[in-house]
Image: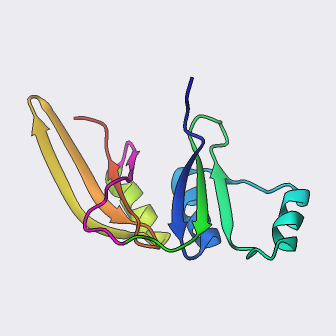
Amino acid sequence: MTSIGNVTFACTDPNRLATFWASALEYEREEWPAEFQQAWEDAGRDPNGAAAIVDPDDNGPRLLFQKKPKTPTESIPIHLDLTTDDREATVERLVERGATEGETKTMEIGPHTETWTVMTDPEDNGFCVQAPDQ
C-alpha cells in the first residue's frame, strides 16, 4: 500500500505557516525529538528551517513546511480543499488568522450545487473552503 507521507509547502517562515495551518485544520505542532533538533542546529541549519503539523486523530496527512524559494505560477496546480459544514464562518475564522479571501464560486451539476471560496494563506499559497454538496 502507498500512502501520503507529507504534503510539503515551500515557504519563507515555516513556524508562522505551521501555526496558521494548525489553527485552520485543528492540527497539532509536531515536536522534533531533542536529538534531531540538536543535530539539525549542529549542522548549521536554521532553527526555523522546517516545521510540521499532524492530525491529532491520525486521520489526515502530515503537513511539512520548509524554508525554501517558491516557484511562481499563473494558477494553483496543487492546493488543499477544506470541507466544512459552515463555509462562511470558516472563511471568516481563517481571515481572522491571516488568510486572504478571494472569490466565491458556485457550480451546478444536475441536482447538485457546489459552492467554494478561493483563499490564500499568509504566504499566498492558494486553497479553497467548500461546504458539502447541497
What residue range appears in magenta?
72-86
Q: Is residue 5 magenta?
A: no
Task: Identify whether 132 is placed above or below 78.
Answer: above
Q: Quadrant of residue 5?
A: top right
Residue sitting farthest toward the top: 1
Residue 83: % across, % down: 39, 43
**Frontmost residue, 14 versus 66:** 66
Residue 47: % across, % down: 76, 74
Residue 99: % across, % down: 42, 69
**Residue at left offset 55%, top offset 76%:** 12
**Residue at left offset 40%, top offset 72%:** 124
Q: Quadrant of residue 75?
A: bottom left
**Residue at left offset 38%, top offset 56%:** 89
Q: Characterize the magenta stretch by its predominant secondary structure.
A: loop
**Frontmost residue, 91 versus 55:** 55
Q: Quadrant of the C terminus?
A: top left
- Left/right placement of residue 100 relative to residue 62 reads left
Q: Is residue 83 magenta?
A: yes
- Left/right placement of residue 12 relative to residue 84 reads right
